[in-house]
Every structure is written in C-alpha cells, then in structure tokens.
Image (tube, grey):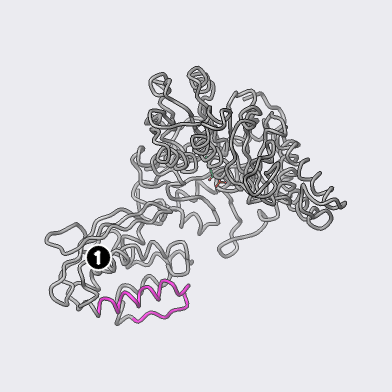
Amino acid sequence: MQLQQMYQEIILDHYKNPHGRGLRDPFDAESFQVNPTCGDEVTLRVRLDGDTVADVSYDGQGCSISQASTSVLTDLVVGRPVVEAFGKFDAFVELMHGRGTVEPDEDVLEDGIAFAGVAKYPARVKCALLGWMAFKDAVAKAGGEQR
Amino acid sequence: MTAVTAPLDVDALRADFPILGRTVRDGKRLVYLDSGATAQHPNQVLDAEAAFLREHNAAVHRGAHQLAEEATDAYEDARARVAAFVGVSPDEVVFTKNATEGINLVAYAMGNAAAVSSSEPEAARFALGPGDEIVVTEMEHHANLVPWQQLAQRTGATLRWFGVTDDGRLDLSDVDSVITARTKVVAFTHQSNVLGTVNPVAPLVDRAHAVGALVVLDACQSVPHSAVDFAALGVDFAVFSSHKMLGPYGLGLLYGRRELLAAMPPFLTGGSMIETVRMEGSTFAAPPQRFEAGTPMTSQAVGLGAAVDYLTVVGMDRIAAHEHTLTVAALDGLAEIPGIRVIGPTDGVSRGGAVSFVVDGVHPHDAGQVLDDQGIAVRVGHHCAWPLHRRLGVPASVRASFYLYNDLADVDAFLAGVRETKRFFGVA
Ligand SMILES: Cc1ncc(COP(=O)(O)O)c(C=O)c1O
C-alpha cells in the first residue's frame, strides 16, 4: 500500500517522540512559517556559534509529516557547519520536489530518506518543507548565510 | 423541510456522472465527499456546453450575424433559467467569475459609491465612511469576510461581527446591539460551508432593514442543496457559484434587487457595460450589463442553464431530503466512534450536508490521507474559514460533504474509513 510508503515507521516515531522540540533560549533568530492552505504552523529558533549551528528549537502544530520532518531536521543540522546544513537542506528540498524520482542519499539525509514516499503526494510536500523553510529563514536572519 | 414521498433513485442519477465511475488510488471505488468544494458534472451539463461551442459559438451582445444572435439567446436564456431557479427576475441576475467576485463587486461598488456620491446622488445610499459599520459573522468563508475587511479599511468604516456558539450556531442573542443605526451592510452565510449550519435569515433581514442597512447573503452552500427563493427571503443581494451546483467553473451569480442594481455604480469597467463613450468620459448600460464588463462566460452560462434544469427535474426538495438522510446517518455513525468531535450541530436540525470533525490524536491532514488511500475524497484544513476554526478551538478539521449522487454506501465507506484512520495511527 502506498500509504505505508508515506507513513514510514521512522516518520511516525519522530511524530510521536519529536527530537529537540520546545523553544529554547538563547537564540540568534526566529522564524514563523505557516501553510495557508491547512493552517499548520511552526516557530523555529536558531542559535549559531561561529560557523556552526549550535541549536535549533521549535514549536508548532501540524500534521505528522510537518512535525516529523522538523524533528529530523534538528537531528541533521545541530552541531554541523552552516554550509553543511545547507547542503542537507538542498538535498531534502530536491528529494521533496522529485515526485518520487529522486534517490535519496542516506549518508546525507539519514532519517530524512524516509520522506521519499511523501514526495509522491504533491499536496504534502509543503508539509514536509514547513520546518525546513523556517530553518533557512532563521539562519538567514541570524546572518548565517554570509559567513 | 416539506414532506417528500419519492426518494431519489441514486443509481440512476450516478449513471449521468461519468467521473463517479472511475477508480482512484489503485482501483478503489471513488467515494466523492467533497461537493462542498466543487460538485461533479452530469453529462447533460457537459453536453450542453459542448453543443453550444460546436453549434452556436459567437460573442454575445454584439455582431449582426446569425451565430451572434443564437449565442446571445442562449446566454440570456440561461440567465432567465437561473433567475427562475432562485425566484427572481432575469434583469436582477449578474454573471460574475465566481461567488467571490460577486461579493467583491458589491463591496467595490460601495467603495466607489463613497467616491462619487457627491456628483451622483443615486449612489449615495451605498456610500459608507468613518462612523459607519459593516456587520459579518465569525462563521464566514474568507470570500465573505476579507472583501468586507478591505472595504472597511478603504473607507474608514468599522467591521463588526456576530459570534458563534459552542455548538456551531450564530449567536443572535443581541441582534439589536450588533446591527444598529450605524450599520450600512450586513453580510452573512445562508449555510455554513464548514458546520452545515443553516442560519435564520428573517431576523437578520428584519433588523437590517429596520435600520436601513443592506443585506448580502452568501448562498454558495444553500442554493445547490435546497429550494431557495431570494425574493421571499427579502435579501438585497445574494451570491452563489455555478461549480458547486453541477455547473461549469468560471461562473458566479450575483442577485441584486432591481432598484439597487439600477442605482449602484459599476465595479469592473470596459467594453459591453457602457451606454456611450467619449474621450472625456462615459455613461453606463442598465443592469445587469453594467456589471458584466468584457466578453462574458458564455458556454459556462449555457452549461449552468442545463445544470439548473437537471436539478429542477430531480427536485430541490427531494435533494434536500436525500442529503438530510445521509447527513443524519453520518452524524449518528460518527457519534458511535470514540474520539471523534464533530464541529457544528450534531443533530439534523437546521443543518445541511457538510459534516466537519476532528479525530483525537490524528491531525486532519493525516486523517484525510488515510481516507484518500481508501478512495474517499474529503476536504481537510480550515476550509477557507480560519476565524471559525480558531473560535472552535481546532487548527483544522476533516469535512465530508454530500450531494444528490451520494448514497448510504458512501456514508458506510466513510465511517469505515474513519475507523481505519484511527487503527492506522494507533489511537483508541
Ligand atoms: C460559503 C461559501 N462562500 C463562498 C465561497 C466561494 O466560492 P467561489 O470560490 O466559487 O467564489 C464558497 C466556496 O468555496 C463557500 O463555500
């Protein structure tokens, strides 16, 4: 069944037990993103330490896909150089826009490869990207892109 | 509701709707429960549109050739049929792009009236400004909310609204203090696209008219599903959309009382809506042409004429009774499933066939996905009524909506789908 491909165990685990959830201080910048078609929202904070993503914290409400993908995001980017984090961002965005044709690289995306099945449902791609867009925006606001 | 003897022969009706014969998601029977968003089209409508384009196509209201004459007749004939369907005269019905444009037409015409009222005394009755009030409700579709917010912003008028009770009815406990001598217009929905609630029109019309305010009725969800007579309701304006009543896309209807349309300044301007044009300025045609700038949606109007004929033959009272049966079956079935919260009236009283709910522990988007996997098409999200969802304390909901081509097998499939949703996500 297609549905099982979409709701991988990994996704449901992240949904039920999200990593890094809750807004924390200190932080350098915050981004609020909303999906206007369904009302899902996320508030995400980023703290940078030099060129490194020192912390990502978030809060929000939304479907399993949007919540789990934000949880996966924190696993992938916290403690990494900003440049590497954006490499993962690009890989995740490419996967999600691939309509199921992109073969994800587990070394880069780790648990994020579980979202390959979501990419087959265009209506859910926005859900999967909600937290990621907040991350990109928050890093840019924190001046992370220029470093 | 009037007593109805002969129930619908849904199997026979379904044969008219080719799309209902297709399968979705790996061979599943399509259970289409999203008619509140847009309805499906019977062959009679598709054929009428195609026949017009094949045999009579031409630009209406211009040209002296035979095709132009036939096209104009077809277009005006459709207007007459739609007008009769809602109990008004053809010259009181304006074709717009959709219901949303119809509401904007009135809101912009009122804004324009404020600008021209010194030179055009006729328009003064529509003008509004600081100190004036616009009244809406908390259960409106964004289409009947945002244009009024914008009008208030442009003119300096104040927006006020009726609240919603916990069980999804309009809170009309204090009508006289919400609609006052300052009120210029009262805009509200006849039937909620989320809750199904059918609102009482008479008390609002009576109060609005007592203080000299205009009434705009959003009839998008009532006209497709029950017999509606705008003249009998006494509203000043009303809007509805072709695509929600078996008709083509790209066509909305605005009803306006004759004397109001006659006095109202235009919204969109250009060709087809003028009387005389000189370089120095122009005068405008009589309604409804004054409000139909540019080449109109002609084949769509013809298709809607066929849709109205189809609905009339089936019978609006029978359709309403049929949907009532399905709605009560769905509500009763949901009540038996633990962890389901229906938003809106949970009985069948003064309510139409939109059933919205949340499943404890499952986000509506996820619930919709599991239903979709079983071939069941529902709507998820806030259904363009974000303030209403906020008021009822839910970020979003799942909505099943019924129409004449749904049957009890669809309701059973839907209820089984809701149970499967809970099983899939492991919630008790
Ligand atoms: C109650 C209500 N009002 C207005 C609209 C807007 O209709 P349309 O999108 O056809 O303009 C809808 C449909 O979505 C509706 O359900």
Residue A42, horizontal then vertical, whole percent:
29, 57
Residue B187, horizontal then vertical, whole percent:
49, 32
The vertical placement of A35 against B118, above or below, is below
The vertical placement of B393 against B169, above or below, is below
* Quarter of the rendering occupied by the C terminus of chain A: bottom left
> Residue at label 1?
A138
Is B123 displayed left or right of B368 in the figure?
right
| Front-lying residue, B5 or A29 | A29
What is the span of residues highlighted in magenta in the rendered image? A84-105
What residue is rendered at 28% in x and 76% in y?
A: A86
The vertical placement of A83 against B201, above or below, is below
Residue B325 makes an appearance in the image: no
Name, please, the residue furthest toward the right. Answer: B66
Mark 1, other Cα within 10 Å: few <14 / some 14–19 / many ≥20: many
Is A51 displayed left or right of A9 in the figure?
left
Quadrant position of ligand 1: top right
What residue is rendered at 79% in x and 46% in y?
A: B72
Q: Please identify the quarter of the rendering in which residue B404 is found.
A: top right
Residue B182, horizontal then vertical, whole percent:
42, 24
Residue B287 makes an appearance in the image: yes
| Front-lying residue, B25 or B182 | B182
Name, please, the residue furthest toward the front. Answer: B280
Residue B141, horizontal then vertical, whole percent:
47, 41
Is A71 displayed left or right of B44 in the figure?
left
Residue A98 in the magenta stretch? The answer is yes
